[in-house]
Image (cartoon, helix red, strand yellow):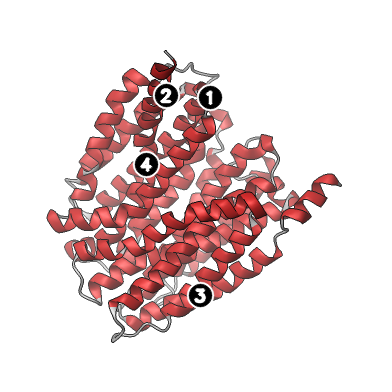
Amino acid sequence: MAKYMEKKQWIFVLTIGLGTMLNPLNSSMISVALTRLQHDYQLSFADVSWLISIFYLASAAGQPVMGKLSDMFGAKKLFLTGLIIVTAACLLALFSPNFLFLLGCRALQAIGSSALFPSGMSMVRSHISKNQAHALAVLSVFASTSAAFGPSISGFLIAAWDWHAIFWINFPFTIIGFVLAIFILPKTESGTIDIRRIDFKGIFLFIASIVGLILFLLSLDGYIRWWALLIFLVGGILFYVQEKGHNEPFIDIQSLKKNRNVTMVYLQFTSINTVYYCYFFGFPTFLQQVQGYTEERTGLIMLALAGFGVIVSPIAGGLIDRHGSKLPMMIGAVLLLIGTGLLLTYRETSPLLWLLVIMAVLGMSNGFNNISTQTALYEHVNPEDTGTASGLFQTSRYLGSILSGSLLGLTFNRQLDLSQFHLVAMVCFTFCLLIVAMSWKLPGQMEISREKKV
């Protein structure tokens, strides 16, 4: 009986894993498809980079809303609804008549997949009491590996078929996940339905402000859209006022003001993701458009960036267990700085092996940075605030990803060559210096212990 229950538990985790992996998988698979989409729709890189930004923007807005809807309508219902939305979005994307329609499909795909993570986590916390930490770790592996290997999967799919294949690949996961969810996931009761709990005004102002920022940044190489900067500034001010006065704000401004260490972690994680995703999305485009590699070979080369991140994660976890978050955080920050510096030494005549070494260093930095910043966050928040803090942590990731898309769109827009990629690396090098400084400034394990005693 015990073995049966244990087996049933892992089918339960597998079912949720099939859903929660869809957001990170679809966020990363697009990286290798950008060049093909740019050619098919006759777009500039700035235009096609909206496929990156729209997904993360919709995810940033969707996650907190879906979390509250999960509480209101029941986690299982929302999980099934999320799978249906993802399936519909992917089906529509296959028949996109134009680029704007495809952008809408990407946004819908992000919203649907955003429903799967909070509802899935809610069911794990509610229905798995034994080995819950192990179950959460398995789900984390689902998410991290799908994101890491998304470009490689995409490379093989596009080489074998076309960019449409990155939408086709969702169907086996959504169909199997839906069937399993119906029979395996427990029925969850609906809570009190109170739409007023959702900070729609704050979310709208957040989106308007970020879109204004993106439009302004993408215009810096030509006719500057000053009106977009005005939207960003006015939207940001109104957003701040709105969040201060809302009972359940989209972003808790008051908590950020009270806990400076937590704010520092969010700023650091935003900066880390700005740098990392510049490479994550920039390398595939550079390899295809400048170096002339096929999508399949590009996907294989991207394994250096993804694979080394996965390999060093257990090492980072061991260091955290023994020394706290600061040491692996410093290692990750320094590796990111070194990798960016090495990228500036890359030339047209450099062998592929040298580029693989650089990508491996950058990949290792990501393995250290992801787990150490998340641990640092939990070291500085109260246990009862873990849920809110985790949501803002994800928002920081999305903001960094959005900024990376804007930076790439600005620098790769008119032409793409090694000098443009070096320009991206120089901007990233500045961010890396800030990341190292912030890592150094955060208190270590002994300082945290003294603060808690006081």
In the picture as drawn, the residue positioned furthest to the top comes out as 1
Circle 2 residue: 9
Amino acid type, callout 3: Ile
Quarter the N terminus occupies: top left
Please tell me how crowded label 1 is: few (under 14), some (14-19), or many (20+) other residues with Cα within 10 Å: few
Asked if disc 3 and disc 4 are in contact, CB closer than 8 Å, the reply is no
Please tell me how crowded label 3 is: few (under 14), some (14-19), or many (20+) other residues with Cα within 10 Å: some
Q: Position of residue 211 (x, y in %)?
A: 45, 57
Quick one: label 2 or label 1, which is nearer the N terminus?
2
The residues tagged by marks 3 and 2 sit, at their Cα atoms, a distance apart of: 43 Å
Asked if disc 2 and disc 1 are in contact, CB closer than 8 Å, the reply is yes
Circle 4 residue: 21
Q: Which is closer to the viewer, label 4 or label 2?
A: 2
> Which image quadrant for residue 352?
bottom left
Q: Quick one: SS at disc 1?
A: loop
Amino acid type, callout 2: Gln
Asked if disc 4 and disc 1 are in contact, CB closer than 8 Å, the reply is no
Q: Position of residue 321 (x, y in %)?
A: 62, 49
Q: In the shown orientation, is residue 439 left or right of residue 83?
A: right
Asked if disc 3 and disc 1 are in contact, CB closer than 8 Å, the reply is no
Q: Quick one: SS at disc 2?
A: helix
Asked if disc 4 and disc 2 are in contact, CB closer than 8 Å, the reply is no
Quick one: label 4 or label 1, which is nearer the N terminus?
4
Task: Give the residue drawn at x 28%, y 87%.
Answer: 349
Circle 1 residue: 130
Please tell me how crowded label 2 is: few (under 14), some (14-19), or many (20+) other residues with Cα within 10 Å: many
In the picture as drawn, the residue positioned furthest to the left comes out as 161
